[in-house]
Amino acid sequence: MSEKKPRTYEQSKKRKNGIMRMVFAVIAIIFEVGLIYFIFFKLNRFENWINAGIAIIALILVLFIYSGSESSSMKMPWVLLILLLPVFGVILYVLIGLSGSTHKMKLSFEEVDLDLFPLLPDGKEAMSKLEVKDSRLANIGKYLKSYACYPAYQNTDIVYYSDAADGLEAQKQDLRLAKDFIFMEYHAIEDAESWQGIEEILEERAASGVLVRVFYDDMGSIGFINTDFVKKLEEKGIECKVFNPFKPILNMFLNNRDHRKITVIDGRIGYTGGYNLANEYFHITEPFGEWKDTGIRLEGDAVKSLTATFLEMWNANNDKKKHDHDYSRYLPSFSYQAKEQAFVIPYADSPLDHERVGEEVYISMAEYARHYVWYMTPYLVLTDEMIHTLCLAAKRGVDVRIITPGIPDKKAVYALTRSYYRKLVLNGVKIFEYTPGFCHAKMCIADDRAATCGTINLDYRSLYHHFENGCFFCNSKAVLDMKRDFISSMKRCRNVTERAKSEPPFLTKVLQVILRLFAPLM
């Protein structure tokens, strides 16, 4: 008999989130059935009035959704659902579809941003140099500065890690050398071996007078952190906060989660990438085969933007009396001589505005490419805009490739991911599935010139609902390191391009249509 594997982060997350959404759905369905019964058996004489009332409410909501600034890919599933099942659709939209970015939360972020982001450099010198080197890449930088407030930097070295375990070991070495402060923000922390090794270092550094802050998402870590986790860290001298604590009924409207992964050490060294601080990311447990995840290390001036991203979230989710009053101490000027002349732009995306930074960068990379643009993503749930961009790039002769998982962590999302294959491959996009296991990396590379690496999946949840972060960089050895890793990963993939061109069976098509209807919820 095989030894039973311990439950891991992805398994529990899938189970917990699935149960929560199922409960909402069941309640709505019961309400729908009950209302229909009540109408037809108890209120026959008012049937026409009630039906008219429901139709009017549904129509008003549909017009509200249609007039919104979201893309058609986000609007149409809700419109269809509300028209087909008015009561169920309205309830589900109120519970899940409405943005959880309350007016109060938005004001809190804006207040912090007014004081924090003017402290970042304007990046004009780096942008002028990038303009001379490649004006089309400079246009991406101009977008990030103008619409996300993140400047371009030089004097920054980048190290790319093709395995999250290597990134974690390097991270721990740098943490041990921290002298002033350590900031860590992660979607998920599992209080197990991988985290405990970090916690020992943080405790030792805090005892030495280093300011240590840990920030994690409650839903991302639910079931993996004891309710005493915050208290435990604070007793060790580590400041700890939770983003958007899940409180049934009282907090059910908050659909936005903190999906970022950031470590900042003394404002000089920063880490980001796809991996959370849970065992399966580092091959300690392997519930879905061999886990593929990646990350980057930044050292130099560009770390300022990672620091600002952390400080924004930390202070916007805090009592005003406990705000940092001097952000500048965390954005130090220091002497550093980079080994290469890279251009680096760490950036973040927020659901509090209507600017889809993550998606726009991915689209811009495809539009920039003349030879190739390659993506790696755990989920492929695309908007019409993204599909059009990828297909058009392939039609004009660009080599467009996408690596997705070979072993899924969520079967419904995996089936949904595969439903997008056919349209893509019929227009020239090549699809590869990572056969050793689950591919959790989120990155893109184009023409040996530019790349992105961060937390942003190619799915609705990352692109529209979550707080995310990434790093755009060019003219760096790390770009070619990423390309080599992509090629190496493709050798371990099955090329499903030709197979995906075939017309799926009728029942499969029906299932795909249903899944597409609920795509924005997954």
Image: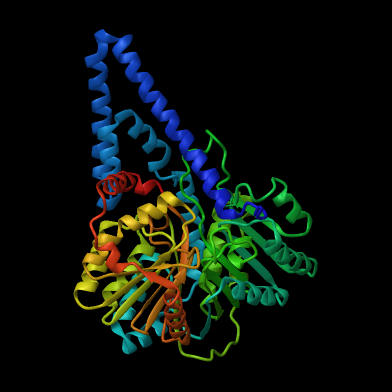
The residue lying toward the viewer, choosing from 503 and 239, is 503
Where is residue 135, by image quadrant?
bottom left
Residue sitting at x 57%, y 38% = 247
Q: Which residue is pictured at 76% across the width and 59% down the height? A: 237
Q: How many marks?
A: 0
Q: What coloring was used for the rendering?
A: rainbow
Q: Out of 488 and 210, give the one closest to the viewer.
A: 488
Which residue is pictured at 48% across the width and 45% down the height? 104
Tell me, yes or no, if residue 103 can be seen here: yes
- Name the image quarter holding residue 417: bottom left
Task: Please identify the residue farthest to the left as the structure is shown.
Answer: 396
Q: Is residue 329 shown above or below 129?
A: above
Image coords of residue 443 (percent x, y) = 43, 71
Left or right, residue 53 beside residue 265: left
Q: Is residue 327 visible from the viewing direction of this image? A: no
Is residue 263 placed above or below 319 in the rendered structure? Answer: below
Q: Position of residue 174 (x, y in %)?
A: 67, 77
Q: Quadrant of residue 207?
A: bottom right
